């Protein structure tokens, strides 16, 4: 049978195939040799990475890139070649030189448009001027004062979370807090953007298998934009609907499209993100189109949920592993409450199960733990790509040619032994207390939200969410790990995704 099919191939076809191979193989070899020995040849890194992006793609797909690249920086220094055309930067001057300067972003960002390339966001706009212009049209939604108009809605979500935690306290059954933190992170994004939660906390469970699918989609989003030719095909409006049938499904896009439609017909909606953006859209329909509004909603849900659940998890996981930190937090909270009660003597009680944002801003140890939980487990992990400008760029003692793709690797900066000695990998909230000069020096390198024109627009919301949810839990419960000997594991794609770390809950 095999012999027969070979005989069926004509001699001319064989000669043509041979000449093709004779052309392709040497060309490929020349490309590979140039990649290895031309530009960036003296930047250390895994051998495979000098030839192909596949080394980097594999470490992202495996969910280990943050750990792998951090370890490489520790071994090889400030600059590591992670792909033929990309150098990861962990030099202390890297964030300032690459992120604070308004350099163009690298190609990874360019194809982050869902469901197709006609849905434009500031995140996917690589030209700094154009990006800043786009961001300006969305900015009014992100201010703390505007967000605090939704404080009651956030409180209601926290109360739903408390109901589930109370239930586990009563039953004494192990609780997967990680799962419930993901629920609240999504539901609060729903409230803030569309005036309506996604309903995870209401149900106390995943809906339509969406969170598991979201994980698959997270790996896809992290890897494919590194292959822009392929990604451009996938997000091309002509083919996008077809590819959506075969690619991992994007729950966030589907839900956000439905949520926006419902939101437009909701007469009780608050002045949420969508209200800000629709107001701008009505004034400048050509500058902020209806598709831009949809894209902004989708990108905020994706950017805001997985990162916040990671920060919530890191806080509780690390503080319960450090019982002195947990007790110190409880003491600080109780003292603040006692003080508040004294100030309110004679007035009606202001007690509420959920902390008000204003009170928590005075709790120094709480704020130190919040910072430290995002340092020791950075929620956003993908390298932030920037392109070296005309004339090149010098970082430390190294100059990179114009056009070189340089990425700031946040985990390598936030866990750098050079910057955070002596206990860079330890959870030490005390490093954020005391001497203002010392903490100001550390603040320079505390960049979990990035820096400069593309830094996180959700920072104010993050502060509100963490400052309300975490002290509320610390005040109300004692929490212990089911497996105290076992460290948690986590995977990293665009964001870090901690694994299961079940806990026992006791109500105080
Ligand atoms: C602990 C939680 C969070 C962390 C650590 C974090 C971190 C980051 C980082 C590092 C960037 C990218 C910087 C760059 O590419 O140069 C970013 C961008 C972004 N983040 Fe966050 N983020 C968090 C939560 C949020 C939340 C809650 C929202 C939504 C309200 C949000 C919305 C965005 C958006 C829309 C961008 C793109 C920037 C832009 O459009 O200008 N993030 N975030």
Image: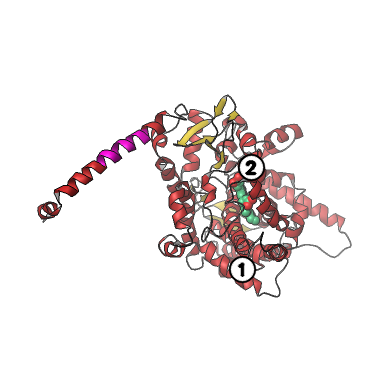
Who is closer to the viewer here, 327 or 257? 257
Who is closer to the viewer here, 143 or 131? 131
Task: Name the spot of residue 234 as percent of width and height, x first.
Answer: 45, 57
Q: Is residue 50 above or below residue 239?
A: above
Horizontal side, residue 476 vs residue 309: left or right: right
Who is closer to the viewer here, 223 or 503? 223
Q: How many marks?
A: 2
Query: What number is the disc on residue 260?
Result: 1
Query: Which quarter of the rendering shows the C terminus?
Result: bottom right
Horizontal side, residue 143 vs residue 56: left or right: right
Does any portion of residue 467 appear in the rendered image? no
Q: Is residue 61 above or below residue 70?
A: below
Q: Quadrant of residue 100?
A: top right
Q: Quadrant of residue 260?
A: bottom right
Residue, disc 2 = 372
Task: Name the spot of residue 9 as percent of width and height, x first.
Answer: 15, 52
């Amino acid at each position: 049978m095999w012999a027969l099919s070979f005989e069926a191939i004509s001699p001319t076809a064989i000669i043509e195939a041979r000449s093709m191979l004779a052309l392709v193989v040497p060309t490929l070899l020349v490309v590979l040799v140039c990649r290895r020995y031309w530009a960036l040849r003296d930047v250390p890194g895994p051998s495979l990475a000098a030839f192909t992006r596949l080394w980097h793609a594999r470490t992202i797909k495996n969910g280990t890139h943050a750990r792998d690249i951090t370890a490489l920086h520790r071994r090889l220094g400030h600059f590591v070649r992670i792909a033929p055309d990309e150098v990861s930067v962990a030099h202390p001057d890297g964030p300032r030189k690459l992120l604070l300067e308004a350099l163009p972003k690298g190609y990874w960002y360019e194809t982050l448009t869902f469901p197709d390339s006609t849905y434009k966001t500031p995140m996917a706009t690589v030209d700094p001027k154009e990006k800043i212009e786009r961001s300006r049209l969305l900015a009014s939604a992100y201010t703390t004062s505007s967000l605090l108009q939704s404080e009651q809605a956030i409180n209601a979500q926290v109360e739903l979370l408390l109901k589930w935690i109370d239930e586990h306290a009563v039953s004494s059954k192990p609780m997967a807090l990680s799962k419930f933190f993901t629920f609240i992170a999504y539901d609060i994004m729903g409230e803030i953007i569309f005036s309506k939660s996604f309903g995870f906390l209401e149900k106390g469970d995943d809906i339509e298998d969406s969170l598991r699918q979201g994980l698959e989609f997270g790996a896809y989003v992290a890897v494919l934009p590194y292959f822009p030719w392929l990604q451009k095909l996938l997000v091309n409006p002509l083919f996008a609907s077809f590819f959506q049938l075969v690619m991992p499904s994007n729950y966030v896009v589907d839900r956000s499209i439905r949520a926006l439609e419902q939101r437009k017909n909701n007469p009780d909606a608050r002045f949420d993100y969508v209200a800000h953006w629709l107001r701008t859209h009505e004034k400048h329909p050509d500058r902020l189109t209806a598709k831009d509004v949809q894209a902004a909603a989708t990108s905020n849900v994706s950017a805001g949920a997985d990162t916040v659940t990671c920060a919530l998890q890191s806080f509780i996981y690390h503080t319960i592993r450090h019982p002195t930190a947990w007790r110190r937090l409880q003491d600080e909270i109780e003292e603040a409450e006692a003080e508040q009660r004294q100030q309110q003597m004679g007035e009606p009680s202001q007690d509420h199960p959920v902390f008000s944002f204003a009170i928590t801003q005075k709790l120094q140890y709480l704020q130190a733990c919040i910072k430290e939980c995002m340092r020791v487990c950075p929620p956003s992990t993908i390298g932030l790509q920037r392109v070296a400008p005309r004339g090149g760029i010098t970082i430390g003692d190294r100059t990179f040619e114009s056009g070189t793709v340089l990425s700031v690797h946040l985990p390598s900066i936030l866990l750098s032994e050079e910057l955070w000695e002596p206990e860079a990998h330890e959870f030490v909230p005390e490093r954020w207390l005391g001497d203002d000069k010392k903490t100001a020096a550390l603040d320079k390198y505390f960049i979990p939200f990035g820096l400069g024109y593309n830094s996180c627009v959700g920072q104010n919301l993050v502060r509100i969410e963490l400052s309300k949810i975490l002290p509320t839990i610390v005040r109300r419960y004692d929490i212990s790990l089911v497996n105290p000997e076992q460290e948690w594991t986590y995977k990293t794609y665009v964001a870090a995704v901690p694994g299961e770390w079940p806990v026992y809950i006791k109500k105080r």
